[in-house]
Image (cartoon, grey):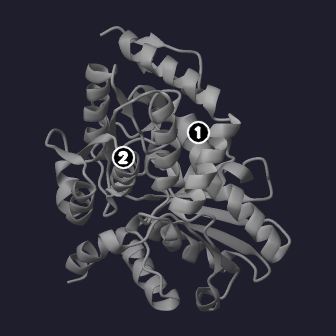
Amino acid sequence: MDQQFQQEGYFGEFGGSFVPPELQEVLNYLSEQFYKFKDDPGYKEELRFYLREYVGRENPLTYAERLTKAWGGPKIYLKREDLNHTGAHKINNAIGQILLAKRMGAKRIIAETGAGQHGVATATACAMFNMECVIYMGAEDTRRQALNVFRMELLGATVVPVQKGQGRLKDAVDEALDDLVRNYKNTFYLLGSAVGPHPFPTMVKHFQSIISEESKQQIMEKEGRLPDAVVACAGGGSNAIGAFAHYIDEPSVRLIGVEPDQAPSLTQGVPSILHGFKCLVLLDEEGQPRKTYSIAAGLDYPGIGPEHSHLKVTGRAEYVTVTNEEVLEAFKELSRTEGIIPALESAHAVAYAKKLAPTMGRDQIIIVNLSGRGDKDVEQVYQMLK
């Protein structure tokens, strides 16, 4: 299949669009429509309306007083994406993209999902706007996240378990892209992570940047200054790029992305092409995407968004790993200390913040992006702890 190289949508050497010509035409049209509407007053007003009245924004920046005392270091603030409708940050992007799909005349929406939160958010938006919804999900993830599969079906979506490969997030993205190539004339691909060919990473960042837009304003109101560090989990990279966006040009703020130690795309990856874009990828001896694993299905991906790849190689952001044991301990500690049960994905950020805190002073501030709530993970954690 002919590959087409598009000199657009780059973050340094990363990004771009390496896709078949027929798909490139679809992406060019999507890009044109996105740039046409993203600053359109009517579109922006409708998006603000749904984020306020349906999603429940803005959500709080919560001072975690007991956690701060327990860790004995800097003030810990939690950006509460777990309080959004559907329980995670994914709904920000789903609403933004579905309003775009509506303006483009799409009747059928497809999406990929790992942990199921993006699938639930997409199914929710489709129910709200009366659109057909097909969700591709790795067969292994449908087993791990059976509750979210039921939620998607309850919302009217068709969930397609993907058996090939490892039956995880990468394989779900493969199937969704294949569907788009076959059905591009009537289908809108509502991509949930800050990955894929241009314009997807730019679109997802645009819709998720509301996270740091709010947190920056909130921390200035609460503390009168910027935080010293912002910490977020990083899988495909959507919550992290949203949490970082409005701080990228603030050099005093450390940006820290936290990966599973069994899927360390940013800490061990090399530049390669995955799913139609260039990023840091974990490759095996044969140059193929390496098999990965994480107890958090939403972080189980062998690559990462192109902007994260750029932030890593330029040194603007730091990327670190934590172990499953550290994540489970953080999951329990936040639950017991603050009465907040985090998603396993978010618990990665909490786990690293705990390690970071002793290296910082009491007059300093860490914002942890709590990307989602842990309802979907409670049964899985129960089985693991047993």
Instruction: Let me know if residue 183 appears in the view.
Output: yes
Residue 176 place in picture, x, y as percent: 29, 34
Discs 2/1, front: 2
Frontmost residue, 44 versus 375 = 44
User: Which comes before the other along the chain, label 2 or label 1?
Assistant: 2
The amino acid marked with disc number 1 is Glu
Q: Residues within 10 Å of mark 1 (few under 14, many from 20)?
A: many
- Is 134 placed left or right of 324 in the picture? left
Residue assigned mark 1: 307
From the image, which quarter does the C terminus lie in? bottom left
Q: Is residue 116 above or below residue 44?
A: below
Residue placed under numbered mark 2 in the picture: 126
Query: Where, by quadrant of the figure, is residue 87 drawn?
Result: bottom left
Q: Give residue 52's mark.
A: none
Query: Is residue 332 left or right of 359 when viewed as pictured?
Result: left
Residue 343 in picture, x, y percent from top left = 40, 69
Q: Residue at x 52, y 87 (%)?
A: 338
- Residue displayed at 31% across by 69% down: 376
- Left or right, residue 8 beside residue 24: right
Element class at badge 2:
helix
Q: State which quadrant residue 34 falls in.
A: top right
Above or below residue 39? Residue 359 is below
